[in-house]
Image (tube, grey):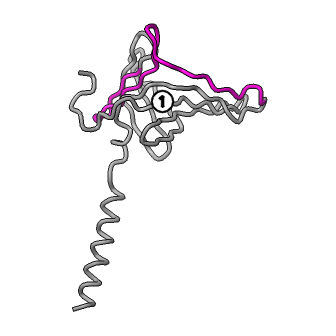
Amino acid sequence: MQKFQKLLLLTCIAWLSVSCSEDDESTDFVGIWEGSSLQKTDCMNPVDNTTTRRSCDDTQCFRLILNGDNSFSFQEGLPIKSGRWDVSGDSLSLCIEEDGEEVCETFIVSLTSVTLSLGTLNEANGCLTNQIFDRVQDTSQDEDPNS
């Protein structure tokens, strides 16, 4: 009987670890994010390493809304851009339609419960540019974050 209980326990642990690893991590990204800073690091010329703080005011706000249906909207003043987003490993792609063609930009992504970092590498000067966003609202449980 003891062997059966151990086998049952090991089976349960294995099942839980497999089922947890198959969770859709993209739901962690869902929410409303506001740009808080822009960081340039690892530049060939150290003078180019900078951090610029951002904040929302009456004229401009860097706001990214990632919806659970993989649609997004991005506001950097007007007009507001919208499209679809996808995450794979440490990359996040934002795709919009321009002149009848889908144009995608892929970022190196880093995520915590309160910050989202979207990075790009400029090979010409070696700078890694990270746009840092703070979570304003978690909409993963909401029906429509735009309402």
> Depth check: 106 or 25 in front?
25
As drawn, which residue projects farthest toward the top? Answer: 59
62 is higher (above) or lower (below) than 18: above
Helix, strand or loop at mark 1: strand
The amino acid type, in three-letter code, at marker 1 is Phe
User: At which x and y percent is residue 104?
Assistant: 46, 28
Q: Where is residue 144 in the image (x, y as percent from the top left)?
A: 23, 28
Dividing the image into 4 quarters, which one contains the C terminus? top left
Residue at x-position 33% and y-position 56%: 22
Residue at horizontal 58%, vertical 26%? Answer: 38
Residue 67 magenta: yes
Q: Mark 1 points at which residue?
A: 133
Span colored in magenta: 46-74
Residue 78 appears left or right of 52: left
* Residue 112 located left or right of residue 18: right
Q: Which image quadrant for residue 9?
A: bottom left
Total numbered labels:
1
Mark 1 burial class by Cα count in 10 Å: few <14, some 14-19, many 20+? many
Residue drawn at the location 71% of the way across and 36% of the way down = 42
Q: In which quarter of the image is residue 8?
A: bottom left
With 146 as the anchor, is 125 left or right in this view? right
Q: Position of residue 140 (x, y in %)?
A: 29, 37
Q: Quarter of the image for the N terminus: give it.
A: bottom left
Which residue is at the front of the view, 60 or 108?
A: 60
Q: Does the magenta stretch include residue 120?
A: no
